[in-house]
Image (cartoon, coloured by chain):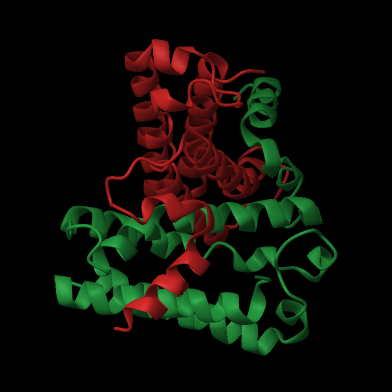
Chain colours: A green, B red
Amino acid sequence: MNKKFFSACLALALGAGASYATSVYAQAKPDVLVKQRQAVMTLQGKYFGPLAAMASGKAPYDAAVAVRNAAFLDALIKMPWDGFQPSTKDEKSRALPAVFDDAAKFKEAQERAQTAMSHLVAAKDEAAFKAAVGEVNKSCGGCHESFRAK
Amino acid sequence: MNKKFFSACLALALGAGASYATSVYAQAKPDVLVKQRQAVMTLQGKYFGPLAAMASGKAPYDAAVAVRNAAFLDALIKMPWDGFQPSTKDEKSRALPAVFDDAAKFKEAQERAQTAMSHLVAAKDEAAFKAAVGEVNKSCGGCHESFRAK
C-alpha cells in the first residue's frame, strides 16, 4: 500500500476522529469526546423517534422500520459511554456533575439502557415491540433525568 | 402506558430527532438532516481512526478492537445516505452539488463504501483486516474527493 496516499486519505476521511489516528489507545481531546457522544444522541433521536411514534399510535406499525431501527439503536446504545471521561468534565455540554461524581449509578443507567435495547431487538411482534419501546423510553428518560441538564 | 408521561419522556429523550415523532414518514427539517449525517461522519471517524492506525502500523493490531469497530462501522455506513435529501441542498455543509446533481454516481459511491465495510466485517485475520481497511479507506476518500468540499 502506498503509505503517503494512505495517510492523505486518512486525514481526509477522519475529520473529528483524526486524533485517534496516532494510536489505538491515544486519548481523544475532551471537545472531540463531547462531540462524539453528542453525535450518538443525535442518531439515537433519528432512529428512536419513529419507533416511539409507532408505539404511541402516532404512526402505523411498520415491522421493517422497527427491525432496522432497533438494530441501529442496539449499536448506538453502546457508543456514548467511553466519551464520558473525567477530562470532559469542564467542557460545555448538558452532562451533569453526577456523571462523574456517581459513576456507579451512571454505569447502572447505562446497563439498564443496553438491556432495554436488547429487548427491543428481540421483540418479535407488535405487542412485544410496544413494551420494549416503553422500556427503552423509560431508560432514556431515567438517565437524562439524573445525568443531563434540562 | 401513561401516555402523558410517555410523551414527556419522549420529548426529553429525542432532542434533534424530535421532528420524527409526529410520523414515521414525517420529513425531518433540512438542518436536522444535515446534523444527523454529520453525526454519522463524526462517529465513523471515532471508530475508523483506530483501525487505520492499526492497518498502517502506527498502532499494534488488536483483534477485539478490530471486530468491535468493524461491527459499529457496518451499522454507521448505512446511516448517512437518507440525510442527503434535495431539501438540504442549500444548508451549510461540505456536501458538493454533485451529491444532488449526479445521484447515480453518488449511489455507486455509497454502494462501494458498504461493500468495503462488509469485507472489513468478514476479515478473519490481520492480513485480511489490513486489506479491508485499505479498501474502506479508499472508498471513503473516493467519495469525499468527488462529493465533499475540501
- Within the image, what quadrant is residue A7 found in? top right
Give percent across and percent down for residue B106. 39, 19
Q: The N terminus of chain B lies in which quarter of the figure?
A: bottom left
Q: Residue at x 67, y 18 (%)?
A: B150
Q: How many marks?
A: 0
Give percent across and percent down for residue B82. 37, 36
Q: Tell whether B87 sits left or right of A24.
A: left
Q: Tell whether B55 sits left or right of A128.
A: right
- Within the image, what quadrant is residue A50 found in? bottom left
Residue occupying the far left of the picture? A125
Give percent across and percent down for residue B67. 48, 56
| Foreground residue among A10 and A91 | A91
Residue B116 higher or lower than A144, as above or below: above
Q: Residue at x 36, y 42 (%)?
A: B118
- Within the image, what quadrant is residue B92 found in? top right
Residue B31 higher or lower than B18, as above or below: above
Give percent across and percent down for residue B69. 52, 54
| Foreground residue among B51 and A132 | A132
| Foreground residue among B147 and A145 | A145
Q: Residue at x 25, y 61 (%)?
A: A58
Q: Determine if residue A136 is in view.
A: no
Q: Determine if residue A80 is in view.
A: yes
| Foreground residue among B6 and A41 | B6
Q: Residue at x 63, y 58 (%)?
A: A37
Residue B138 higher or lower than A37, as above or below: above
